[in-house]
Amino acid sequence: MHLQRIGKIIFRVFLGLLIVAALLMLSVQLMAKKSIANFVETKLPSHMQLEYKLIDVNVLTGTAKFKTIDFRVRAVDSLKQVTRLQIGSLEVIGLGYWQFLFNKKIALKSLNIEKPILKSYLKEKQTDTSQTDSNKIGLLKQIYIDEINVANGDVTLLKGDNDSLAMKLDSVNIKIDNVTTNDSLINSKIPVAYGSFKFEGTSLYADLGPYESLKAGKVKVDEGDITISDLKIKSKYSKTKLSWHLHKERDYIDLQIPEVSFEHIDFGIIQKKLWVSTGTGKIKGATLEMYRDKLLPDDTERKKLYSEALRKLPIQLDIPKVEISDSYIAYSERVNRETSPGKIIFDDVHAEILEIQNVPEKNEKTSVTAKALLMGEAPITLNWSFNAKKESDAFTASGTVKNFHSKNINSFLESNLRVRAKGEIQELYFTISGNSISSSGDMKMKYEDFKFSVLKKDRLRINKLLTAIGSLFVNDGSNTDENGYRYGGIKAERDPTKSFFNYLWLNVGDGLTSTIIGNGKK
């Protein structure tokens, strides 16, 4: 009896302890649930609002799960909604309650976000900078997360002035490891620090302004390597309709690239300026078609040379190498209403671009080495280099053309220059040194039976008088040195309202004139 009574007492004590433990666990769970709800609902700034249908907290497993979340952000000084984030479910795994309740730290093993739909308006240009402090987020606890997973999300960015689409990306999947932020970091330009990063998205659309847009089939980032598939940058209007919308000359563009990739992308902030560095970039199988309606008024805005444009970028850029392979470029101009636009084609384009950079500590030159088939037939090369740090925008360029039959470019010459050519350029070499103002160089050519015919305004008939006068000055290639070459000098002045390639063409054109019309001596 005595032992039986002791057993009953032990049982009652044990049962009491279980009840107390259960009540304590329930209290802790309710306290945790209330604390989490209080944190997400009351610690947000007044212009932010968060709603959810269900929250489930399990103290034993350290899990908290929210369902059907609706997070909205208004402009600080108005009722206009600027951001809305809807989430199917958000699951927190491995929450350290002790750290959360008693220390200023939120530590999680995993944060899983399913089906987030983000819709946000891009900021309009701020005219009053006094609102900067009021836009800051007051983060009361440090946050550390072992892993963040985002599954099947959609992102839409709209322009604040007219609600038009600025950017859209579907099927977003993200995995980030070792994520941390705090009160000071959350308000910086890069609000978190993290370890590895993986990202995938499909059907990218980005508005590039009034006239062009960008599309991509898939964007993938894996441990710093980025691959973009089926990239397209194209004018929003057809060639004809684009001219209706323009008040001055502008290129119609149609660029398609099956795949673009860059290795080892990294970025950060130095003295409030964004820096971006990469490894090797590769562009495969690109096709670029450009067209310009020269019947429109000239664009008289000053054009930067590439060295100046790189020097004055708002970010610090460092790309050691970009390789371009198996690509195609076509350029055409409409100069009159009576004839079809003339076209120049560069096929089988291969190029290597080194040191695309504006890093103050680096002094390496940016250089381009390219080769292609002019009009799909004649081998052509270009070597070009410049130092973006030089305020003079000094550059050097050299190139070659071989086995070129002039009749292949007559459609362009007839339409643009009212000239028809005959003969073969067996070899052409040029070298140029210049800056943002002027340039000089030399050229040598080996050619045969080269003749020009000047056309009348209708570009259909030959102007016999001007052709006869021109033939008096043009050497057909018979008066050469012992190696079969004729030589010419190059002098050109840059038109600052034109592009670098117009500048290059002025140099080549002056060299051709000097070589064919001059005495041909070295």
Image (cartoon, rainbow, N blue to C red):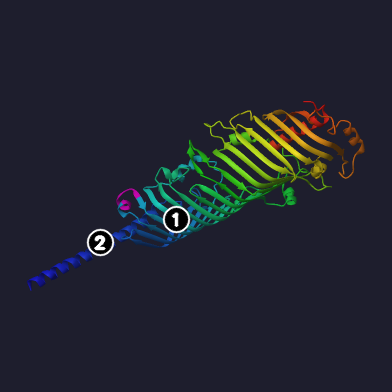
Viewer-nearest residue: 135 or 481:
481
Query: Could you say where residue 80 lies in the image, as x and y percent from the top left?
Result: 52, 52
Q: Quadrant of the N terminus?
A: bottom left
Q: Residue furthest right?
A: 465
Q: Is residue 483 above or below residue 139?
A: above
Magenta residue check for 70:
no
- Residue 60 on image: x %, y %: 31, 60
Question: Which numbered disc, 1 or 2, marks the residue closer to the eye?
Answer: 1
Q: Quadrant of the C terminus?
A: top right
How far from the left and from the top, in percent, is residue 179? 41, 49
Determine whether the residue tagged by mark 1 lies in a helix, strand or loop: strand
Q: Nearer the viewer, residue 130 or 119?
A: 119
**x 56%, y 35%: residue:** 358
Q: Which residue is located at x 66 percent, y 47 percent?
A: 327
Amino acid at the residue labelled 1: Asn
Looking at the image, which residue sits at the far bottom? Answer: 1
From this viewpoint, is residue 335 visible?
no
| Magenta span | 99-105
Q: Is residue 137 left or right of residue 512?
A: left
Instruction: Give me the residue at 57% from left, 48% from top.
Output: 261
Using the image, determine if residue 235 lies above or below residue 271. Answer: below
67 or 360, which is in the foreground?
360
Residue shown at the point (77%, 43%) measured from the top left:
294
Q: Position of residue 510 (x, y in %)?
A: 77, 31
Amino acid type indicated by mark 2: Leu
Residue labelled with disc 2: 24
> Which of the two residues, 344 or 399, is positioned nearer the viewer here?
399
Residue 450 in the figure: left or right of residue 348: right
Which residue is the site of mark 1? 149
Check residue 474 in the rendering and tell me which mark sits there, or answer none: none
